Image (cartoon, rainbow, N blue to C red):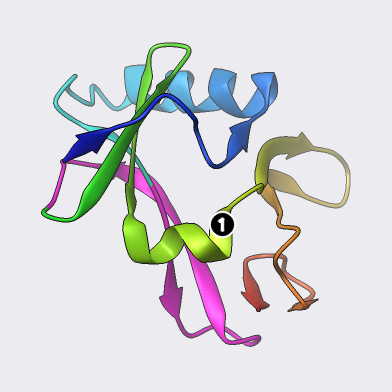
Amino acid sequence: MTATAILPVTLTEGALTQLKRIRSEQNISDEHGLRIGVKGGGCSGFSYILGFDTTKDGDQAFETDGMKIFMQKSAMMYLMGMEIDWVEGLQNRGFSFNNPNATDTCGCGSSFSA
């Protein structure tokens, strides 16, 4: 695991607040960090991964506002510059992904193509 100072994605204040709330409510240990990544699948080709996990071989480690973040190096080219936000409105509620690398996204906002 390699630590670096520059986080390739941005977590908004709203996203960080919700992640900290989830961590507290679910009693997630300090060993766990937030895993941000991509996997094949979804209606547009790739789906986002967002959840608490322990570190794995090949992870890059970051920290922002006390939150440890783990990313596989292979996912970074798809996620560089992405913003993760928390949206709470009449139409939807949850995490949103604003990814400048996405050439197409689906209606649900959780999958993309690059």
What x and y, as percent, mark residue 84?
Answer: 64, 41
Question: What residue do we see at 50% from left, 33% from top?
Answer: 7
Q: Of the residues shown, which amino acid type is indicated by label 1?
A: Leu
Question: Total marks drawn?
Answer: 1
Specify the segment rendered in magenta. 36-56
Q: Which residue is mark 1?
A: 79
- If the image is split into quadrants, where does the C terminus sit? bottom right
Depth check: give the residue in front, 98 or 90: 98
Direction top: furthest residue: 66
Question: What residue do we see at 54% from left, 78% from top?
Answer: 46
Is 33 rendered above or below residue 108? above
What x and y, as percent, mark residue 43?
Answer: 63, 87
- If the image is split into quadrants, where does the N terminus sit? top left
Q: Secondary structure at mark 1?
A: helix
Question: What residue do we see at 87% from left, 52% from top?
Answer: 91
What x and y, as percent, mark residue 103?
Answer: 77, 77
Does the magenta-highlighted stretch encompass residue 105? no
Q: Quadrant of residue 23?
A: top left
Question: What residue do we see at 65% from left, 85% from top?
Answer: 44
